[in-house]
Image (cartoon, rainbow, N blue to C red):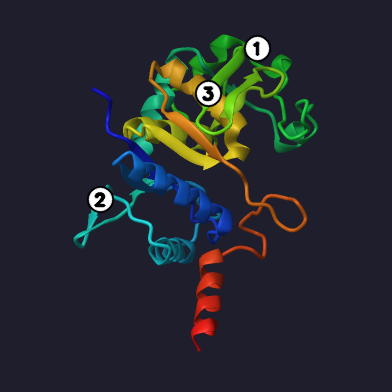
């Protein structure tokens, strides 16, 4: 029997939602409804420096304004609240230990400047961690905890990672060329995005991940974590990006931020 469809909305309170987020969430909700499934709300609040309470409040306001409905989350006054990544640290640490035990991780001493000067992949965006920078495999044995050191996932050099996306179709990337050893934990004791999102999607039994197509390469990295843990990955559906007038993808720093707020202002003016 096929498992019931489980999707998720996973905004990060590091800025206001923009129209690109809204469109992605609309696709996620539509696909969940078509499958008579459910949506989980998860606040990805691990970036301690950039997350703000005001942004999180705005996320709730905007989601409700656009009619987004989720059917699972902690009970908050009779309503479904969000899961929070900041409250799930022990689960991330447990997976970090399993990956380290399996020999998939290594400590990284390289600085931000080192990485800025490292070679980039064929498309010029992805910094490829040079294989000669890897320490000896036994280096990880000297550490019992993740805190205090940057940690990277050791990718299988020369292996092509492939998957079939629900919209894009076949997609693949070559480990060691298109992407290199990637961060999974920071020395300030915070898991990196790639690790946290995989752990959460697996633990929450997400059957399909809907997100922007700028994360296609990221999916290849995440598939390696699923494989290392022996977990079945979800399906993926990457939606087209909403571009600004200059042809670049929108970001939370752009003037297009807080699209829901702008939409409300337009509607209010039209009603007066």
Q: Is residue 143 visible?
A: no
In x, y percent, where is residue 3?
27, 28
In whole angstroms, how far apart are the C-alphas of marks 2 and 1? 41 Å
The secondary structure type at the circle numbered 1 is loop
Mark in the foreground, 1 or 3: 3
Q: Earlier in the sequence, mark 3 or mark 2?
A: 2
Q: Is residue 98 left or right of residue 215?
A: left
Task: Choose between 47 and 1: the one closer to the eye.
Answer: 1
Task: Choose between 205 and 267: the one closer to the eye.
Answer: 267
Residue under the point 53% across and 59% down: 17
Vertical placement of residue 244 versus 87, above or below? below
Q: Earlier in the sequence, mark 1 or mark 3?
A: 1
The secondary structure type at the circle numbered 3 is strand
Q: Is residue 270 visible?
A: yes
The disc placed on residue 74 is 2
Q: Residues within 10 Å of mark 3 (few under 14, many from 20)?
A: few
Total number of numbered discs in the rendering? 3
Residue under the point 62% across and 46% down: 241
The disc placed on residue 157 is 1
Q: Residues within 10 Å of mark 2 (few under 14, many from 20)?
A: few
Q: Earlier in the sequence, mark 2 or mark 1?
A: 2
In whole angstroms, how far apart are the C-alphas of marks 1 and 3? 21 Å
Q: Residue furthest front?
A: 34
The residue carrying mark 3 is: 164
The secondary structure type at the circle numbered 2 is loop
Location of the N terminus (image quadrant): top left
In x, y percent, where is residue 11?
47, 51
In whole angstroms, how far apart are the C-alphas of marks 3 and 2? 33 Å
Q: Residue furthest left?
A: 78
């Amino acid at each position: 029997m096929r498992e019931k469809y489980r999707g998720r909305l996973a905004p990060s309170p590091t800025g206001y939602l923009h129209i690109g987020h809204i469109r992605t969430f609309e696709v996620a909700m539509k696909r969940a409804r078509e499958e008579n499934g459910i949506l989980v709300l998860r606040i990805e609040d691990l970036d301690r420096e950039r997350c703000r309470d005001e942004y999180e409040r705005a996320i709730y306001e905007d989601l409700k304004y656009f009619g987004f409905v989720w059917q699972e989350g902690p009970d908050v006054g009779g309503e479904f609240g969000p899961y929070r990544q900041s409250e799930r640290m022990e689960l991330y640490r447990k997976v970090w230990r399993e990956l380290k035990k399996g020999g998939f991780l290594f400590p990284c001493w390289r600085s931000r400047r080192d990485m800025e000067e490292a070679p980039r992949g064929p498309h010029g965006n992805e910094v490829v961690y040079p294989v000669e920078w890897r320490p000896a495999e036994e280096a990880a044995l000297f550490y019992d905890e993740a805190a205090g050191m940057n940690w990277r996932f050791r990718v299988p050099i020369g292996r092509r990672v492939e998957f079939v996306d629900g919209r894009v179709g076949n997609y693949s990337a070559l480990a060691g060329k298109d992407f290199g050893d990637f961060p999974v934990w920071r020395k300030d004791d915070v898991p990196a995005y790639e690790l946290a999102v995989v752990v959460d999607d697996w633990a929450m039994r997400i059957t399909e991940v809907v997100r922007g197509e700028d994360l296609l390469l990221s999916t290849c990295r995440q598939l390696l974590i699923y494989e290392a843990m022996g977990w079945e990955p979800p399906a993926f559906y990457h939606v087209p990006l909403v571009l600004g007038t200059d042809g670049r993808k929108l970001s939370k720093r752009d003037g297009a931020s807080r699209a829901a707020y702008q939409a409300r202002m337009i509607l209010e003016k039209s009603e007066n």
